[in-house]
Image: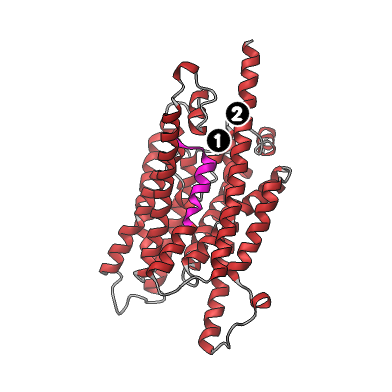
Amino acid sequence: MSVADVDALNDVGKTDNNVPVAETSIHEIDPFIQPLVDTNELSAKNELKHEELAGIDGDYLHSRPECRPSLVSQNLRRCTGIMYALIGSSLFTGSGFVIKQLRVDFFDALLCRFIIQTSILTTFILYKRYKILTGSTDLILLQITRVFLAVCGLLFFYSSYRYIPLPDLTTFRYTQVIWTAIIAMIIFRERISIPTVLAIIFTLIGVVCVAQPTFLFGNRKKLSTSNESRKSDRILGLALALLCALSISGSIVLNKKLLVLKIPQSVLMFHFSSLTLIILICNQLRNRFILHTYSNHTMFTWRFAIAASVSLLQLLSSTVTQKAIKLEHPSIISVVQSSDILFALLLQNLITNEKSNWLVLVGSGLVTASIFLVGIHKLWISRKALLVEKTKEENVKV
């Protein structure tokens, strides 16, 4: 790796002129609903102007006085952005819930989504004439590691959903926010803040409340053979959910590094989408020719058709989320996306016979609170950095 690459990796935690705070925050969103194509790649220039950055931040700190929108216009813009984020979260959570209720294998249902998603990204990359893998050997290894972690996150997520309820899975998945902060703190050597410490404590307590380990809570009733089997399934599901959160956290940190090194976001998403598609195709071949899963019945039933169609809503969720980012600060959008936990609880308790106990509700609430703490803290840091930049610009003009 060149000296420039090393310097970029060391400075990735700082505010860079080429990668502003608000822009890097955009890519901390869950990889499952990241934008298919980064909006900056659609324009001739890849770098944001100060006015565009102010638009993303929502404060309009760099906008000219005569062009500054009214307070009513700003509030309407923010409310619209939050509404888009809520719609995106509900579409993503709802689609997974519907597929589960249809009793269709997730990896079968997702095949159609990733065929379309990979086709879109391939067409865009060919149009822009991007290289699929570029840079030094170390940089290519970094891209391979990142896509491996991202794909593992998706596989762990849907594998876990086979064994545990959606609220438990969603709660564990969103611990990724805390793991990301911890990993970034170690790699970027950032000082740990009080909000981060509180968020880590809330998350750990929340995870314990959701997992409800027997060495703390004991066996509330005598376990039969079937109950023992359910307990084993639950432990496996929770372990997969935790691995999902850790994998996503690692991919997010590496995603930041690669963006600083000028790897286009669409290329990173192409890596993720194409590798996932290859794994899904291999899974189909395994089911058909090794396990002979569909020897006595066809996969293409009406349930599969509905599940495949519903999975396409996740592409719409990606588009809606990108629209939300353009209207509201990315940290606020990340906080709003934690409403996935609320949507999961509502769907689970209102529609199914499996109800969440009060410990799960408390645990989900604590994890949500930790996301609020981290998100609001990042928003404050971002705005503070923009204020400092504005002050410097005004001093230069004077």
Tell me where the magenta segment starts and ends, as one range: 327-340
Task: For residue 16, say whether it is visible.
Answer: no
In the drawing, what numbered circle is on residue 157?
none
Left/right placement of residue 275 relative to residue 364 reads: left
Picture coordinates of residue 107, whole percent (x, y): 41, 64
The residue wearing badge 2 is: 386
Asked if residue 5 is positioned above or below residue 159 in the image, the reply reads above
In the drawing, what numbered circle is on residue 22?
1
Outermost residue on the left side: it is: 302
Asked if residue 150 is positioned above or below residue 27 in the image, the reply reads below
Q: Is residue 87 magenta?
A: no
Instruction: Give the amino acid at mark 2.
Output: Leu
Q: Which of 9 and 210 is in front in this view?
A: 210
Q: Nearer the viewer, residue 389 or 292?
A: 389
Picture coordinates of residue 54, whole percent (x, y): 51, 28
- Name the secondary structure under disc 2: helix
Q: Which residue is drawn at 54% across and 74% down?
A: 234
- Name the secondary structure under disc 1: helix
